[in-house]
Image: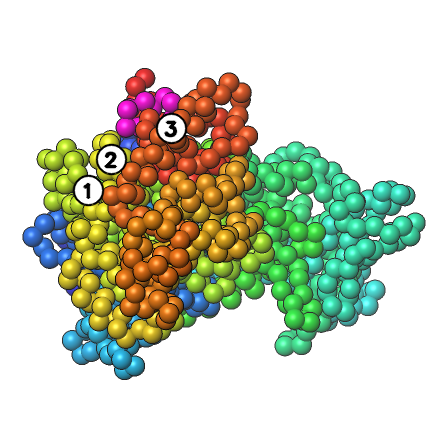
Amino acid sequence: MNQLFDNQASETGPVECLGQTFSSDAARREHFLKLLAEKLKDPEFRKQEGFPQGTDEAILEISDPPYYTACTNPFLEDYIKFFGNKYGASIPYAKEPFATDVSEGKNDPVYLAHSYHTKVPHKAVMRYLLHYTEPGDVVLDGFCGTGMTGVAAQLCGNRSEVESLGYKVDEEGVVSSLYENNGEGIWQPFSKLGARHAILNDLSPAATFIAQSYNLPIDAFKFRSEARQALDLVERQAGWMFDTLHKPTNEDIDEAISFLRLEGKPKIPEHIPFGRINYTVWSDIFLCPECVGEIVFWDEAVDKETGKVVEPFDCPHCGISTTKKSLDRAWETKFDNLLGEHVSQAKQKPVYISYKVGKAKFGKVPDEYDLALLDKIDKMKPNIWLPVFRMPEGDEARRNDDAGITHTHQFYTRRNLISLGLFRSGYKDVFKAINLTSTALVASKLYRFRSQNGSFGAGGGPMSGTLYIPSLIKEIPVTKLLSEHIKKHFRLKASRPMTVGAITNTGSATKISLPEESVDYIFVDPPFGSNIQYSDLNFLWESWVSVSTSTQAEAIENKTHQKSIDKYRQLMTEAFKEMHRLLKSGRWMTVEFSNTQAAVWNTIQTSLQEAGFVVANVAALDKKQGSFKAVNTKTAVKQDLVISAYKPNGGLEDRFLKTAGNEDSVWDFVRTHLGYLPVVKIKSGEIDFIVERDPRILFDRMVAWFVRHGVPVPVSSQEFQSGLYQRFVERDGMFFLPDQSAEYDKNRARSGQAPQMEMFVSDERSAIDWLSDFLKKRPSTSQEIHPDFTAQMGAGWKKHEPKPELKDLLADNFLEYSGSGDVPSQIHSYLSTNHKDFRGLEKSDPNLIAKAKGRWYVPDPNKAQDLEKKREKALLKEFQNYLEFTGRQLKEFRLEVLRAGFKDAYSKKDYQTIVSIAKKIPEASLQEDEKLLLWYDQALTRTESDF
């Protein structure tokens, strides 16, 4: 296999890079740095969307071109020319979506090596890569985060790693998975062992810095040697900052303090006993609302045996019972010598020190020496570079302004700040200093002191997804953290060496400098609405590399940056359009989704469809260990969802353009789409209902396809359902191509019962669908239907949607047998099957007629079309009332009326009507309805293009 890095670790021997040979790796880097430096001088190069904020010097310092640039990577096209294969329609490729739910834990050394706000375990990504790609294929991750897709792509060539997924690899490298067949396990080949080539992209320089380090093929021993040299520098110059006196006498304290008063590093006599600090607890200080006395939170609110906060607690001065929420902070003013000005900050003090002497652990209250030591360090002005940057504007970035923490350096105790700065200065090549960022957050004031499982001080860590500074801070010495992290990364690099490398780009996913149809597969875990404010949270990391995110192109919801969900959807649509451009026709994209809001879910689906993708499957990804929000938010999902979407082959597009979107195009689309859907889905050993094969979902996908092309939909939903029965094979409420039905029948015969589709009633449309499913199985009288129907109309009903009467839904959408004429076939079949007294009776039998009278049933397609036309006419009449409404906002409305009205207006190209009515309904109602959102977004795009 060709490798991006050939002999990359060699310091003296020749190395090859993208087909060029260099005398050494240093010569390779020097060559490409000069090319990058020339690019950076070009103003047009810096105008590219998503170009980060940073000087030329800062960008060059942390870049390792061509593999990684802390800006737009100008070598991407060279990479794809070297490794990519041009798209060819004649190249056979046929893959069903990966329909199996995936469960992979986070407690893997790869996952734990560097923290990040969201991360998909690399083993989960490997399953998708092995399913969709072959060795040597090019995969893209447009929102790469820490680069797990790149790690997964390389480890697809690692036999033991692939086998750890439960797969079997034979001597020729064929990968097989275990399938159950008639109770027997059968190994079925589906892929080949071999690394894939990864292109990683992220807007955040912090993310790409971490990603390139994960994917860098570097000798583990060389990595450890360089990291230890930098750590030794820290230990020599700042190790004394983390020493504390062990059981000192007053004379010991006085003598030690006298040495602190001397300039430079203190040289404490050996006869004074010392220990090394494990951690120091810092506590907030509050003011009593009654007596205005100072309350040290640790002293009054923490149980010293368990380390847990106990509320309420008493003021030590006046005895009043109080809680933290009812207290104001105490403040202090001090000189910040890095800013050169006095600053006012919330008052804190060290309250407890855990330390070791040899292997023995001790605890103590800070003594006068500890306070004098901290005072000396605070007054030092080191002659090394340190990150002193104002926190940027953002929904999360400036949350600590009200505590006087306004700049990056203030997130650290001074000794941890200096130590990290020394570690950075100890590297010749800063891009290799991954432990700088891996420790940057845990070494900060974000680290909470907590006790877990009865172990004092054993818990803690920064709160996920925030820049929250706690009232009890656990300051862990940087020297201790670095030592642990270096060992952790060494073990990772030694046990799972990267082989072919990846190429990393820092820029917007809306514009990636690659040719059309050059990528074989895409895996993305994009940002989701306002879930995580990435640029705000990454700024601390980015301050250490002096290059920060360009927030203008960031696809999030953010009030400070005036980014609504509409702006988020616009940016996501542009990103997906770019991915659609890059992906080869007929190939797949996997989108990992983690958000509990229906509006964000609909936004992602709408953006995918507008970009030209077609959704084929939604499955679960269980990462086993949730983040803070996922675990503690009541509405949070415990599993992420994985969307499988494909880019239709060029033949479908060409045929659609030729037929101008007539009815033939409808069935051409459905026929093509069915070919991409999974045929059989097994869940917990039973055959599962495939939602995408449901006729209602098929209709929605077809409508989205036509709307995306700006063409009116030529068939109604009932005409569509009638056409499905005429052209395709129906099984258990799902539709298949003829050859697919044979495979489904074979698997269905082995299953004990028919698969059932779960249905949740939340509005008029879903209520009609529920009734349709109910009556297909059991034609019933309204009295028989009523108890089950009432049970469905529960708490899940949408707020602004009036609840319809059962009698109205039945009259508008179904038929009632009056007792006149023969019993309809649907009712006859049900009664003769479920009631033995009516078996074998003719449809005209009086007893059968009497039993059938008053039962409602689903009409046949022809009559259903008449009912649909009648119902649509009534809906449009009601929509006219909405148009004539002169108030600001409709308080109550029927979604079915809005859907019918939007569809009708769109077919007439009356886009302004859609936009104006959308303004009259709550934004949440619009964003949470996928169908309305589709019409609205297309109308908005077309009205904007008219100006």
Indicate the amino acid at tag 1: Val
Q: Is residue 6 left or right of residue 549?
A: left
Q: Which residues are magenta?
A: 906-915
Compute the Cα span from label 2 to label 3.
17 Å
Q: What secondary structure do most residues of the magenta stretch adopt? A: helix
Q: Residue at x 76, y 49 (%)?
A: 324
Asked if the stretch drawn in magenta spans residue 591, the answer is no
Circle 2: is it few (<14), some (14-19), or many (20+) Cα within 10 Å? Answer: many
Residue 663 figure quarter: top left
The numbered mark at residue 876 is 3
**In the image, residue 702 lies at what x, y percent?**
25, 43
State the SS at label 2: loop
**In the image, residue 67 lies at what x, y percent?**
28, 51
Against 591, is 929 above or below?
above
**In the image, residue 83 lies at what x, y percent?**
17, 53
Q: Are marks 2 and 3 in contact (CB under 8 Å)?
A: no
